Amino acid sequence: MKIIGLTGGIGSGKSTVLKLFKNLGIRTYSADISAKQLVNSDEKLIDLIKTSFGNNIYKDNILDSKKLSKIVFGNTEKLKLLNSIIHPVVALDFKNFLEINNDDYIVKEAAIIFETKSESNYDKIILIRSPLEVRIERVMNRDSLSRLEVMKRINNQLDENSIIDKCDYIINNQNIKNLKDKVLSIHLELKG
């Protein structure tokens, strides 16, 4: 089974592309969605987060992600700490996902493949690109964040120009028709 990595900056359209693969009958895994579930369900992870960021980072047993974001997106060391706590748990969850899924290929969405130097874990990597202003608008609307908060997140990610030559497929997310066509083209190639 091939493992296909799907990456791109915040607001580039990774979730949309992942959904298009899922609509084609491909099993998909979202590291972001899994992490959001695990930080509220995995007791060991919850304890580690509380130990590192304080008990008050949880409100009514739910992670206060806005509060945590304010801490980590203003402090590189705190962001590294958070990633070092969450990534091993998500990696184990993905390993369990692989054990119960056996298809020609699966697609795993992970925003920071290159930042974590995990590109060798994938047979192919797809990069989703979108114009910066479009990405900013999407994230502001989706997450009710200010432009400054979105830019802090974008500035914590690698510049896609530094990874473009390391990706096997590039999808320029400009409109849904072109997006569907490109996903179908990649799908047919991967199935072949």
Image (cartoon, grey):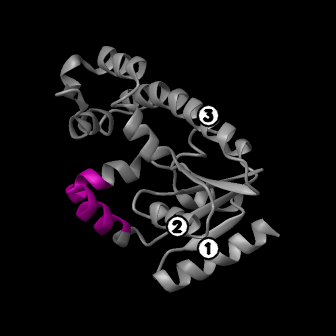
Answer above or below: position of 147 versus 75: below
Residue located beneath label 3 in the image: 96
Asked if residue 152 is positioned above or below residue 99 in the image, the reply reads below
C-alpha distance separating marks 2 and 3: 23 Å
Question: Left or right: where does residue 182 sit relative to residue 58?
Answer: right
Main secondary structure along the magenta-highlighted residues: helix
Locate residue 84, reporting x and y percent.
49, 26
The amino acid pointed to by label 2 is: Val
Which three-letter amino acid code belongs to the residue tagged 3? Asn
Residue 62 is situated, as x and y percent measured from the top left of the image, at 24, 32
Left/right of residue 170 with respect to residue 137 in the rendered view? right
- How far apart are the alpha carbons under marks 1 and 2? 7 Å
The residue positioned 60% from the left and 46% from the top of the image is 114
Region of the chain picked out in magenta, as a range: 135-150
Quarter of the image for residue 26 reads bottom right
**Residue at 42% across / 17% down in the picture?**
44
Q: Which residue is mark 1?
A: 183
Mark 2: few/some/many CA within 10 Å (<14, 14-19, 20+): many
Q: Position of residue 160 (x, y in %)?
A: 55, 59
N-term mark: 1 or 2: 2
State the CA–CA distance, disc 1 to disc 3: 26 Å
> Relative to the observer, which residue lies in front, 185 or 148?
185
